[in-house]
Every structure is written in C-alpha cells, then in structure tokens.
Image (cartoon, coloured by chain):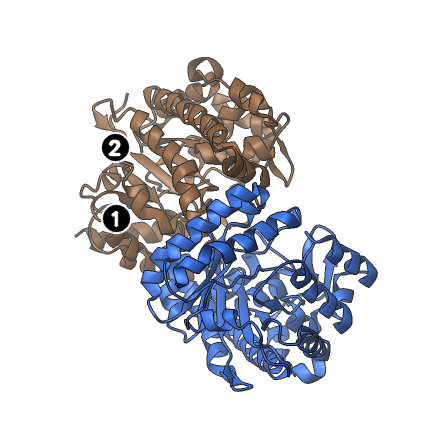
Chain colours: A blue, B brown
C-alpha cells in the first residue's frame, strides 16, 4: 500500500497535533455533483452504482478531484447488510430506500443469520480495495455501516418512517426479540466493518440516522448497547496504525456523555450542538466531528465563511476536531459553495493549531 | 365564569403543591378517537371543523368525556395566523397543511401586517368563549399558537419541509428580512394569545414544532428571540389568576437553559430528554411538561404503566411537572391505551406529592 501523504484526518481523530483542521462532507459523493449524476445515469440505478466496484470507486474519487478534501468515504449504502440478509433493497424515485420483504414476524427475526461479508458482500470489499489502490495514499479511506437500530427500523418498517410505529412497538412489547435482532445486526456490522478494515478502510463510521428518534432510556438499550457491542468487536489496529471509530447519532446531542464512554474514537455531532460545550462535556475521551448545518451551503460564500469561522471558534484551539457538515450534503447545493466551505475550513483553522 | 374545580394543571405549572401530577395529551382531541372522526366527517374538512365554534367546542370536550384529563386545549390549527394574513391554508389528505399563496419575495414579507384577532380570527375567540362556558369550571382551558419560526417555515416553504431550504436560505442570506417577518409574526401571536386569554384561555402554549431543526446559534436568533418577544408581550394575569406560558420547542432539549431564561412559566420537553437531568438544569426557573414517547401508546397497558412509573421517578418528588406525551398522540393509538396512560399518571404520582 502507498504511504499516506495526508493523515490529518486520522491524526485529528486521535487528538494528535495537526497544522489545520481536516474536513470532509457526509455524502460528498452525491447528487449535487454533475459528474456524480452522469455516472449514476451510466449505472442505471442506485444499486447498480453501489454494486459495481469500478463505478463506486469512480464516484468516491470525484469530490477529491474537485476539492482538497482530507478524507474519502466509500460510496455505498447504509442498508447493504439487510439486503445481503435477503430483504431485497430497492429505491423508488423520491421515496428513499425500501425493502421488498420487510420483517413481519418473530419467526423471521429469529431466522436471520449473521452475515459473512466475504461471501455475501464481496462487491463492497472489491470497491474498498480498488478505491484504496486508486487513492494511492492521497488521503485516508473511511468505511462505514448503518447502526443496528437504524438498520432494524428499515427492516421492520419496510422503508423510512415518520414515527417508527412497528419498530417501537417491538422494543416496548417484545424487548427480548428486539435485542436478538439488534445483536444479530451488531455481529453482522462487526463482520462487515472488520472486513472493510482488512480490505483497506483506515477509519470507520457508524451512521445511527434514527437513534435520535428514541427516548433517553430506549436509546441506551436499543441503539447505544448494540453500538457498544460493535466498538468492542472491531479491529483496533491495522497496517501499523490505529483504526479510529466514529459514532454518529443524528439528534444524539443530549447523549454525548454516554456515547463517549463506549470507547469510540470520535463522535459525530449535528448542528443543534454547540461544539465548545460538547468539547467540555466529553473532555479528552473522544474527538468531535461536525457540525455545520448543510442548509448554510444554500447561502453565499461569504456567509458560509462566517459560519465556518463561528464553528472553529466554538471548538477552540488544539486538535480533536474534524470539520464536517452536521448531516449529508443535499442535492440542490451549488458545488462552488461546497468548495467555499472546504477552503474556509483550511484557511481559517490554521491559527487554532499554531 | 364558573369557579375552577380542578386547578392542578395551573398549580403544577406554577410549582405550587398538588396532590397528584396533572396530565393532558397534545392532540388529545384527534383522529385516534372515533367520536372525533365522526364530528370531522360532519364538518366536511379540517378547516370546516376549526372554523366552526360549535364543532370545535364539541371535539375539544370529547376527550374529557372519556378520560379524567386535567386540562382541555382549544381545538384549532397552529396555522390560523398566516391563514388570516391571506396565505390560504388548506389540507391535502395525507400531506399535512399547505398554503395556496406562500411568501415568495421580500416585498410580500414587507407587506404583511400584524393581525387584528378580534376582526380576523373571531371564530377562534368564539370557540374559546363557548368551550369555557361548556367546561363550566371542570378543568382549565389552554389556548395556543404556533411559534413565529414555525409559522414562517410553513409560510415560506408553502407546507411542511424536510430541510427548510428556502427558510434557511432567508435567515442566512437576508437575516434582517427574516427578522422583520418573525417580529411581525411575534406581534401577531401576542395579539392572538392575549385575545384568547381575554376570551377565557387560562394558560397558553407556544408550539415551536420546527425550532429543533435550527442550529444552536440560529435557534437563539430566529426562534427563541421572537418567542422572548411574545413572552414579554403577553398578559400575565387575568380573572385574578396568573396565566402560565408554556414554551415547547420539539427537539430543543439541548437549549433548556436559554428557554428557561425567557420568563416562560414552563417548558415542554420531548422524550429525548431525561426529566430528572432537565429539572436539575432549569432549577426553580420553570416547570416541565412532558415527556413520554407517544409510540409507547402502541405497547400494552402494562408496558405503558412501567414507562409512566419511570417518567415520574425521573422527575422525582414535588410539584412542577405536568405529565404529557413528548409530542401529539398519533392516529393509530387504541383509545384504551390513552386511558391507561392517564390513569397510570394519576395512580402512580400521588406518592411523589405526599
């Protein structure tokens, strides 16, 4: 493997000194980029893109051609694991992901087996290997998975949901069945992320998109506990380097204390969080990643720069911060504005590391 | 006016001693009740129901016939003010509220006038007067309004929104125009709620449904500041009693400190908040209202009772807590389960007030 030329992202996650704050954007390979839309048209549909290692590699690298990003993230979907379990992932235009065969009984939940990534998700590992090769040490590659709770909501509701009626009925009425499902998913995520690490992922992020929909107590039992199981089960070092683990619960700003105690390396935070307050709260346990409202990218480059300045000032001096948006970049953003965000982070952050 | 027979709700909001914890449910007059669905059919559509004082009174009282609730809440919509401003509120089945003429220019924003409730929303005041008369002192009546930020999002987006693209572009690119709009709305809400109080509302709640979509800083500037203006402008005492003000920002659990400093009487909190932690945080500044996940009502009565017990234990001994759900009750809930929730609050809370 080529030596890593820019390791600021990995160093910041480990709270080691850097010369400026590294930055990447969730969903940086996405629909706001015309070159992404062109490749997606070529692929036919979204799963055609995820399932083709060459095309997945192509779109992963596209934002790095445009912007001086400090990390690449594998292009894939958070729902590959349930798809591998046979639920039949598909996408309807404008409606988000859906499953042809959602889980509809305790028997179906109990029949689920922990996945074997090498056998069932080889296309993801092929993409990781190819991206790593093509990156040629330019920046680190992030692997990822959906969190068990988040996967479970899609598997039970059959798609996205406003109130998670079926999944919440399960956790409240049949907590042991729910825990069996979540543990099966956690063990699958462990297999999946460890395989990604062995294939070349240099950090991993767990996307807990819907953990924030849970109550204070239910989050601990049904989302954080299976994520703790994952943190405990992951490879901690590979290729002679630590492999940082980032936990991102959207809407989890009230629970950073508990998240910081899992042993994760860093926590993703959304824009409802004041970074300075969060930093005081988590102390030296974890780094923080985030957290500009992606909607700021609809504003002018000057305004974006002001928001970046405020975000950096809120975190303050020293390492331990990876700049990012507080959620994925949205399709209608002007690519020039994404560039203004990234440039502002690099230009304005240097004094905080002097 | 008849003397108030059950004032536990008002006393708890003022943190005065009560013998048990009072309870009501957001959207307690709603689609989960067959009698509500029957009246709504009679009314033709949702606006036909809101706009007819007799029918609005009928549905307001329906849940009180079924359950020993400690408060009634005016049946109306949060978007009556923009409708009175001429935006043309309507409802499409399964799609939520929409406006025929959303705001599409600075000129349209600048042309908006503060409403005159007596003239423009007389049907709401007629409903308040009629409900107060029919309640005959049984429990207090809550008046309400949407928050300026929440109203603004619907007025600009034209309906509900995933990312509030237009409204957020406005606050970031034209903050002064946004503030003009929010102040016009705040002054309208002051007129509206004061008129409701004079017509008979004994407490008022401001529903900030979308404040939680804002960043830490933007919330303060664009949602909390106009709510502060409202708190400052409201009648504080009427009919010889204090008129409590409840601020409810869904998803505002990280910002309770700032909300408690507005001079509001109580804060509504959703289920992501641990009540005991929140109570320590706000101290004696405000009471708390909430916060069971409405999805718990899909579970069994025994399970509901356990969750109520946990909520009461989290708040602990003494007054200052009004039990509620953390958001509105949903259409698919079995009415018997809502009854189990209310009964559990009454039965299990007495020891905390001994």
Percent position of residue A157, x then y: 61, 60
The answer to the question of whether label 1 and label 2 lie on touching residues, with beta carbons closer than 8 A, is no
* A84 horizontally vs B131: left or right: right
Percent position of residue B295, x then y: 48, 55
Furthest-top residue in view? B119
Q: Decide which of A152, B35 is in the foreground and name it.
A: A152
Residue underneath mark 2: B5
| Quadrant of the rendered image containing residue B222 | top left
Image point 57% across, 34% down: which residue? B38
Residue underneath mark 1: B282
* A343 horizontally vs B209: left or right: right
Q: Is residue B22 visible?
A: no
Image point 49% across, 24% down: which residue? B81
* B217 horizontally vs A233: left or right: left
Mark 2 residue element: loop
Image quadrant containing the C terminus of chain A: bottom left
**Residue A309, placed above or below residue A217:** above
Percent position of residue B21, x then y: 27, 47
Closer to the eye: label 1 or 2: 1
Percent position of residue A311, x then y: 43, 52
| Quadrant of the rendered image containing residue A138 | bottom right
Q: Decide which of A173, A325 is in the foreground and name it.
A: A325
């Amino acid at each position: 493997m080529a030596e890593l030329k820019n390791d600021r992202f990995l160093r910041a996650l480990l709270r080691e000194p850097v010369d400026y704050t590294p930055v990447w954007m969730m969903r940086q390979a996405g629909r706001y980029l015309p070159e992404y839309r062109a490749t997606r048209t070529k692929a036919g549909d979204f799963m055609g893109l995820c399932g083709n290692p060459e095309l997945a590699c192509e779109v992963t690298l596209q934002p790095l051609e445009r912007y001086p990003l400090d990390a690449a993230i594998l292009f894939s979907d958070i729902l590959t694991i349930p798809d591998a379990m046979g639920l039949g992932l598909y996408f309807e235009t404008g409606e988000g992901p859906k499953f042809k065969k959602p889980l509809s009984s305790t028997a179906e939940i109990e029949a689920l087996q922990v996945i074997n990534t090498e056998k069932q998700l080889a296309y993801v590992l092929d993409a990781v290997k190819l991206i790593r090769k093509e990156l040629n040490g330019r920046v680190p590659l992030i692997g990822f998975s959906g969190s068990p709770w988040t996967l479970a909501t899609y598997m039970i509701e059959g798609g996205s949901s406003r109130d998670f009626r079926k999944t919440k009925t399960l956790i409240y009425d049949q907590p042991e069945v729910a825990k069996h499902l979540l543990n099966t998913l956690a063990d699958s995520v462990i297999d999946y992320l460890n395989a990604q690490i062995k294939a070349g992922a240099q950090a991993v992020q767990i996307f807990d998109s819907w953990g924030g929909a849970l109550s204070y107590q239910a989050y601990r039992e049904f989302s954080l506990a299976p994520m703790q199981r994952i943190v405990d089960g992951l490879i901690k070092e590979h290729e002679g380097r630590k492999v940082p683990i980032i936990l991102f619960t959207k809407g989890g700003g009230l629970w950073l204390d508990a998240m910081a105690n899992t042993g994760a390396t860093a926590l993703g935070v959304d824009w409802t969080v004041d970074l300075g307050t969060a930093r005081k709260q988590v102390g030296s346990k974890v780094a923080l990643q985030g957290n500009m409202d992606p909607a700021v990218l609809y504003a002018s480059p000057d305004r974006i720069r002001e928001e970046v300045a405020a975000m950096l000032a809120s975190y303050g001096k020293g390492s331990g911060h990876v700049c990012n948006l507080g959620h994925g970049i949205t399709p209608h953003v002007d690519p020039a504005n994404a560039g203004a965000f990234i440039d502002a982070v690099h230009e304005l952050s240097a004094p905080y590391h002097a």
